[in-house]
Amino acid sequence: MSKAINIAIDDDGIATLSIDVAGESMNVINENFLDDLEAHVKTISEDENIKGAIITSAKPAFMAGADLRMLGRMIGDNKNPDMAEVYGACYRMNKVLRAMETCGKPVVAAVNGTALGGGLEVVLACHHRIVANDPKIQLGTPEVQVGLIPGGGGTQRLPRLAGIQVTLQYTTTGKNFNPQEAVGMGIFQEVVEADELLAKAKEWLMSKPIAVQPWDKRGFKFPGGGGAMHPGAVQTFMGANGMAQDKSLHNYPAVEAILSCVYEGSIVPMDTALKLESKYFAKMVTSAATQNMIRTLFINKHDADRGKGRPKSIEKRNPQLKYLNNLHCLQTFRLNDYGMKFTRKLLNL
Amino acid sequence: MAEAYIYDAVRTPRGRGKSDGSLHEITPTQLAAQVLEGLRDRNNLDTSLVDDVILGCVAPVGEQGADIARTAVLVADYNEEVAGVQVNRFCASGLEAVNMAAAKVMSGQSDAVIGGGVESMSRIPMGSDGGALATDPAVAFKTYFVPQGISADLIATKWNYSRDDVDAYAVESQKRAANSWEKKMFAKSILPVKDVIGLNVLDRDEHMRPEATMQSLGGLKASFTDLGKNIGFDSIALQKYPEVEAINHVHHAGNSSGIVDGAAGILVGSKELGEKMGLKPRARIRGFASVGTEPTIMLTGPSYAAERALERSGMSKSDIDLWELNEVFAAVVLRFMEVMDIDHGDINVNGGAIAMGHPLGATGAMILGTVLDELERTGKSTALATLCVGGGMGTATIIERV
């Protein structure tokens, strides 16, 4: 019995991978998921009877992003983590997804529910992407909101599918989009009724499609221009750098890291680009700002919302308690760069 | 250490840097080659005595790429043993080229070197060479990069120059340039540009607007408000300069340097060169300096470069008779006058780039030639020419008539 992804192969040689991560109400990317995906990709690639594969979810939502607790395990309490080791752990996701998109067999994503962060990145690494026609489905890359960057190829495949400008807008803000918008952006090829999802996915596989991503074909060009060195992209990046610094006030290293991934990654081939992305991801995972954001905005907030610090004598729904809890969360933020600079300058230090 | 002397200085007139400008049909190679031909023919220069030609060029791509200095040497029919090298210190490239020429002579490694510059902004637009400063996030974030116009407006705000102050400076620049042309003060150095059949296409700076008044400039919209407020660059400047509350956008096309085409060259040589060629040196290069300064405000370099050049030359401010500072934006000159305590009557006396334009790679050599002409015309002795430079730098050169 699989711990994260079930595989079933039908008479036509179509393998269906149903993501069902054990012990989680919503699918998340953890070690079990990566182990299963790696093994299944090997099977799909090597088994001559398999013609292609469908990836879908056995849960109502398709998949959320990486398990933040897994990221915590990558570095533990180590204040001086071995960067080569952290990078290796971060690169694993990109390695598995890259193996999937270059496995030689067509893979189609049948997205039945919300796909965010790493969940969407699994989808982007498929050769064909179909999503159910349900406006409630949320798609997006919210990593920046906890100080992270899309680390499963999102900063590389999104600009190659949707263009640099659109990618920067969504990845630096973490703003979500719905299925119809995703088709308009060029991320999905089809939006179909939910009950037709698997049939349409199989139909595409039976049409004998070519299992090569556009960016792996000779002469590939970015939508809207040829990467960061394209004259049009110069204006895009100059403007994006300006707006991002205006909004982030140099307090959110992930915003800069995302811009760097898209900029630097757009100049090099996909394999190099993915390695770069993993390096920036490793840089973020080990940065104090990101660790603080994850602790405050995810772990501590989660605890605070559940009233973890509530003395037993105080009733559960006391509104003052919630305020105090949130205040405690915020105190864990460091005095930020801007504040430090401002204070130093005022004090002539 | 050997002395470096200026034997001659020439420049083309500056053509409007647009497709309707008079120099738009002239290739940058031709602009540079005609300057080299002019220096040779005016001085009966035996070009086999020239070791090197150093030309500034700020957008060295396309037809300005692949070492335009060596290209121009070949096109100008200089002796083929004359080498050529293109340098880029942004707006000060032309002056830097002269300084490098002087350094080669002073060090005794060369007897004659031409320093100068070329820029055809109508054919190779500013920014054509890309670069990491503005676009690479890892660079732009680290350096708090803002476009130059924001830096100029930051200077105006920080030093409290109003829109009227910068406009008044611009009106005066136009007046001085018009007066200098009318009285033929540039005649000695101007080299009319010829077309492919040898006819003159331009013999006068065509960017000038002598009719400009406070009223006419007052009608112009500030150029950098949108970049500052909507693209976020004001915010970046304020993050670096929290003592400034808000940027006052005062610069516009009428009080900033004009976009033009042009080229210039200065023949620098040792004392022996003059004796061998029968040439009389016009000035001695006393000293020079380039210096890095805070990159976000970017354009404050000239005062620091000037001070360093003065110190290196063992001189003080009072030893300088005439000052020349490139008028890239009016506030840059106003600040320089204020912090260096220089009277407006002693600086940019013939007008500057606000009136006549700023062909990026060439301007440094142009203004050094202009101030040399003015020293000779007025019988004065010493001058300091300087320019502010992108990325936060300044370059300065001190000359003394001999």
Image (tube, coloured by chain):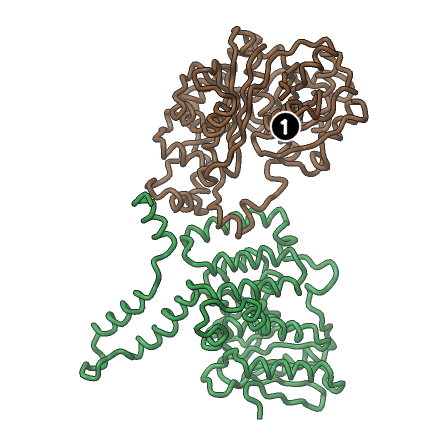
The quarter holding residue A2 reads bottom right
Question: How far from the left and from the top, in percent, is residue A254?
Answer: 47, 61
The quarter holding residue B170 reads top left
Residue A267 position (above or below residue A109)? above
Residue A137 position (above or below residue A235)? below
User: Dot 1: within a 10 Å radius of its alpha carbon, few (fewer than 14), some, or many (20 or more) residues?
Assistant: some
Q: Which chain did the image draw in brown?
A: B
Of the pair B112 and A104, the residue shown nearer to us: B112
Looking at the image, the residue that sits furthest to the bottom is A1
Residue B387 falls left or right of residue B158? right
Per the image, the residue denoted by label 1 is B100
Residue A319 falls left or right of residue A282? left
Residue B243 position (above or below residue B54)? below
Q: Residue at x 36, y 34 (%)?
A: B158
Q: Amino acid at mark 1?
A: Met
Q: Which chain did the image draw in green?
A: A
Question: How far from the left and from the top, in percent, is residue B377?
Answer: 55, 7
Looking at the image, the residue that sits furthest to the front is B1
Of the pair A310 and B376, the residue shown nearer to us: B376
Q: Residue at x 56, y 26 (%)?
A: B358
Question: How far from the left and from the top, in percent, is residue A40?
Answer: 65, 84
Question: How far from the left and from the top, in percent, is residue B362?
Answer: 62, 26
Residue A75 position (above or below residue B210)? below
Of the pair A175 and B93, the residue shown nearer to us: B93
